Amino acid sequence: MTDLLRRANGPILIALLLALWQLAFNLVGRDALTPPAETIAYTWYLLGTEAFWRHIAETGTAFLIALLLAILFGLALGLQLGLHRLSGQVAEPLLLAANSVPKIALYPIVLLLFGIGMPAKIAFGAIHGIVPVAIFTMSACRNVAPVHYRTAAALRLSRWDMITHVLLPAALPEIFSGIRIGFSLTLIGTILGEMFGSQRGLGYLLMTAIGLQNTRVIMSVTLLLVLFATSISVALLAADRRLRRT
């Protein structure tokens, strides 16, 4: 009975969200929203067009590269600061301050450095994801039990072997949490980059639709982004929970 109720939670939540969406449409009208059935139908139509898939491919490429860079540079920075206590103590306030700065304020600098196009979108997306990955990785290194480091020293492991065979397995759950947050922020950064400095991609479609007050496109693109972000976030959260149970 309990398993049945758990399985029903997802469909019940989806039905509730659709009902609230329909209610909001009834209250505010077509100028601000489109109803669920119409939005789903128009989204299906867009997915059948080649031009729309080119925008999806543009956004997907920029996001994947930005996420990979955010993870690699975030891990490298977090490990470096986490393994050197003095460096970590000096850099941690700076990282926290950088995390609190609205990244959109940095976008003019990004445009000057990379120009309008794919490099700027990738850079802006990566900027959003690097800091949380670095902060969680640094914290994970500090939270590893000292006995692990003493064991690695007693076995005379090289620095690389200590990181790969001792540190990362022990710190992986917390590092993975940082990657999970970095995923969401990198996606936000990539879409924002496309909205303000690109001529292709889903963010560009959103910005163009806002300018033309094309509610159908706004709702359809938003629906796709929400579905993608939610599905990946649920999968990452499930993996995070499994890592913490092991």
Image: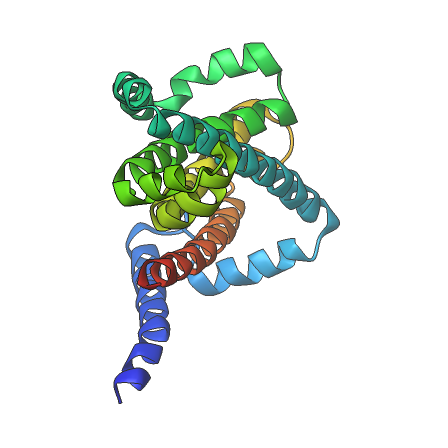
User: Is residue 210 among the parts visible in the rendering?
Assistant: no
Counting from the top left corner in percent of width and height, residue 189 is at 46, 32
Q: Along the line of sight, which residue is nearer the eye, 28 or 189? A: 189
Colour basis: rainbow
User: Is residue 214 among the parts visible in the rendering?
Assistant: yes
Q: Along the line of sight, which residue is nearer the eye, 200 or 229? A: 229
Q: Is 202 above or below relative to 238?
A: above
The quadrant in which residue 92 appears is: top left
Which residue lies most toward the right here? 50
Q: Is 179 above or below relative to 39?
A: above
Q: Along the line of sight, which residue is nearer the eye, 62 or 237? A: 237
Work out which quarter of the rendered image holds the N terminus and state it: bottom left
Work out which quarter of the rendered image holds the C terminus and state it: bottom left
Q: Is 142 above or below relative to 215?
A: above
Counting from the top left corner in percent of width and height, residue 135 is at 33, 32
Q: Is 108 above or below relative to 60?
A: above
Counting from the top left corner in percent of width and height, residue 155 is at 43, 42
Q: Residue at x 28, y 24 (%)?
A: 96
Q: How many marks?
A: 0
Q: Along the line of sight, which residue is nearer the eye, 129 or 77? A: 77
Counting from the top left corner in percent of width and height, residue 225 is at 49, 49
Q: Residue at x 60, y 36 (%)?
A: 65
Q: Residue at x 42, y 59 (%)?
A: 239
Q: Residue at x 30, y 56 (%)?
A: 24
Which residue lies most toward the bottom here? 1
- Going by the image, does 135 lie left or right of 218? left
